[in-house]
Amino acid sequence: MTQPGAAAAPQGDGSAPVQPVAVPGPGYPRTSSTAAALSIRGLTKRFGDKVAVDGIDLDIPVGSFYGLVGPNGAGKTTTLSMATGLMRPDSGTVRVLDVDVWRDLLAAKRLIGVLGDGVRLFDRLTGRQLVTYAGLLTGMDRETVQQRVDDLLRLLDLVESADKLVVDYSAGMTKKVALACALVHAPRLLVLDEPFESVDPVSAANIRDILAGCVRNGGTVIVSSHSMDLVQRMCDHVAVIAAGRVLVAGTVDEVRAGESLEDRFVELVGGRHGGDGPEWLRTS
Amino acid sequence: MVAHLLRLRLLLLASSLKRSAWQVVGLVFGGLYGLLLLGGAVIGLIALAFAPLEIAQTTIVLGGATVVLGWLLLPIILNGIDETLDPARLAVYPIPMPQLLVGLTLAGIVGIPGVVTLIASLATIGTWIRNPVAAVAAAVCAMVAVLTCVVGSRAVAAAASGFGTRRRTREIMGVIVFIPLLLLGPLLSGIGQGLSDAAASLPSIAGIVAWTPLGAVWSVPADIVAGNPGVAALRFAIALVTLAALVAAWRYFLADALVNPRVSSGGGPRAKGLGLFGKMPGTPLGAVAARALTYWFRDPRYVRSLIIAPLLPVLFYFYYLTNGNEALLVTSGPVVALALSLSIYSDVSMDNTAFALHVSSGVSGVADRGGRVIAVLAFAVPILVLIGVGTVAVTNTWVTLPALIGLSFGILFSGLGIASVVSARVVFPAPLPGDSPFKSPPGAGAATLASSFASWGILAVIALPEIVLGIIAVVTGSLVLGVVNLFVGLVLGTLFMVIGIRWGGKILDRRAPDLLQQLMRQR
């Protein structure tokens, strides 16, 4: 029951060496060891009067497939932006594999791959050019980049559209090419904001396989999503965020405590209305 | 339903103002400017009552036809009109077609351009006030004219979105229409020069225009005053047929657009292989340069700046032909250098949030700055050499060539250096990716205005040696001074460019995330 990863992704083949993390019961997993891929302490951010992130503490163990769930406007994207060096926090620290992100941005960014939500791409490039660009920007040599770009395009079923401009891609293809950009420098920590939005089921399954492969090989993947079902099946850890705070964090089994993740989430976050809606909507 | 659409339009107008105080300021100034123009037009039109009939008719027909033409062309230039009441967004609601047409038409009149056109058109009543029948006709014709303008521009927009489903077609159209507009000034001045002696030919032009759909409606009251009721009736018929045809076309394209919404997928152009990414060095610097240069040729927002560069000397050449004044022509090299060097001010704003890739990949600030500069140099250097050679060839003053080239390069390099520093700090407003290059977001804040003035000042100071030397060399025609200026321009310019790239790179290393947040807000 307390074994993390027991409820891991369907691909989980038992042999997946999930890093042993001491989780003292439900609640916050406080791991003081160096095994944290991402360690957030006292993170805050306010925009004007609105507190978007209100003192978040979170540890994400190395080798975990971590789901971040929360209602709209909970501060997920803000938290992930600050954790990946894209937004300066008002206070708090972020460490990625023992690198202080806001002290040594460059070193941290080499370890992180980011897929942002609601961020534009250089969409006047072709898919192949865009991923190549992302690779070259991180300072890899051209041969390595070329080979990885070919692999990624094949893995993500983008070979046929590789020579089309990204601006002409569908929403799902755009997500996939953005994911390729995040993967191209083989980051040890992958931070993906809504990676499955508008991706077709087949591609989503392929992406899940790729991510599970990353985790099996000692990488760490953080995914924010609205799909509780997906998180429950795919992730081994989950944190629920609402109103800029972590409500609960731990292994998926701990958090859901016997219920489905969705029920538990609704219970934690609240805001459900009872009934069938107003009478005039019941037309039949 | 019609009232609903109208109310929606007003609500959208009001709430767009609530978003930013600067937008209100922009609107107030825009409104004042519009009022000034409108006031002038109204006074002028009323004053025409005391002018001879022929002059009044000619002015109103030609002016009115230009206004109608403007309304028709606007949607093409702006890549779709103000989309607040985009039919595509209304497609999900069950609105009967006739009500939709009426509602959208009225909504089109409500808005600054519509109201200005309406008032100016009604002012023609004042022109014909001394003949009651003509005045009544003018009132009727003014309404017909305004409807023609609004319905026409909607029809063109609907048609353009119909067969302009392909993104690239739309973009190319937008830029191509722009070229004759740029050249309109010199062409008109050229034609005007030829015609100024024969201003008498304007009435005959107006006579022809008055038989076209553009001008017919404006001529009717004048024909009544002139005592030609038959001609007036015929021209009024042309106007009505025009309006009816436009309504029919609009209805057709609108019905089509409602069931075949504009989708941005489909074929689209393909580019085999890596393009410039395979040719530039495989380093972050080379990659940024390849990306930026690709954009210069592929993104309409950059293409616009790119076509202005060769068009400016052409413009100056026209003026040279008509006035014989060489001074303007000779400065075209330095002026183009200035325009090109300033163009990367808004580079980061043009990236918009795509800049996040630069931030998250940890590319060094120097590579980011340098790559953008290299992209501009790649085409600016040959263009400036060509312009320099071209201008001295036309004026036959080859001795000034080194001085002019030195001045051009000095300004280009120094300007690029300054822009590299400033654009790492300040986000300049720029059209969003995919938007029309002519849509510039309102509300350039005081800070951006101040910083662009400041950087012009700084450029004037640091390029002072080559400016002064260049002027002396050109005026005296000294080859020695010219060659000296060539070296001064190259050496000083390169120096300032390198300093600017390094300094801007350092700023970027420190505050790239903050710059990204500024861009996020601008969205």
Image (cartoon, coloured by chain):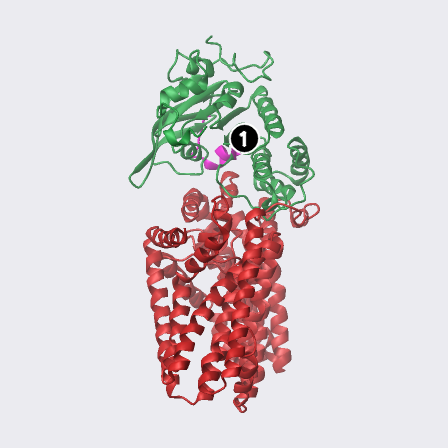
Rendered shade, chain A: green
Query: Picture quarter containing residue B135?
Result: bottom left
Q: Is residue A264 above or below residue A104?
A: above
Q: Residue furthest left?
A: A49
Chain bearing tag 1 is: A
Q: Is residue A243 left or right of residue B57?
A: left
- Pick whichever, B75 or B448, lies toward us: B75
SS at mark 1 in the image: loop
Amino acid type for the residue under numbered disc 1: Phe
- Name the image quarter holding residue B383: bottom right
Q: Which residue bears the numbered disc 1? A: A196
Kindly tell me whether residue A94 is visible in this rendering. Answer: yes
Residue ID at (60%, 44%): A166
* Residue A114: x %, y % from top left: 51, 34
Instruction: Judge by depth and name the residue closer to the eye, B351 or B375.
Output: B351
Reply yes or no: does residue A107 show up in magenta: yes
Q: Point out residue B124 in the picture as x, y percentages from the top left corner.
A: 40, 77
Q: Taking B50 as reference, is B363 above or below it?
A: above
Q: Which residue is at 51% across, 75% downward?
A: B236
Magenta segment includes A199: no
Magenta extent: A98-114
Q: State the red chain.
A: B
Task: Kindly identify the residue that appears in the image at 57 percent across and 56 percent down.
Answer: B252
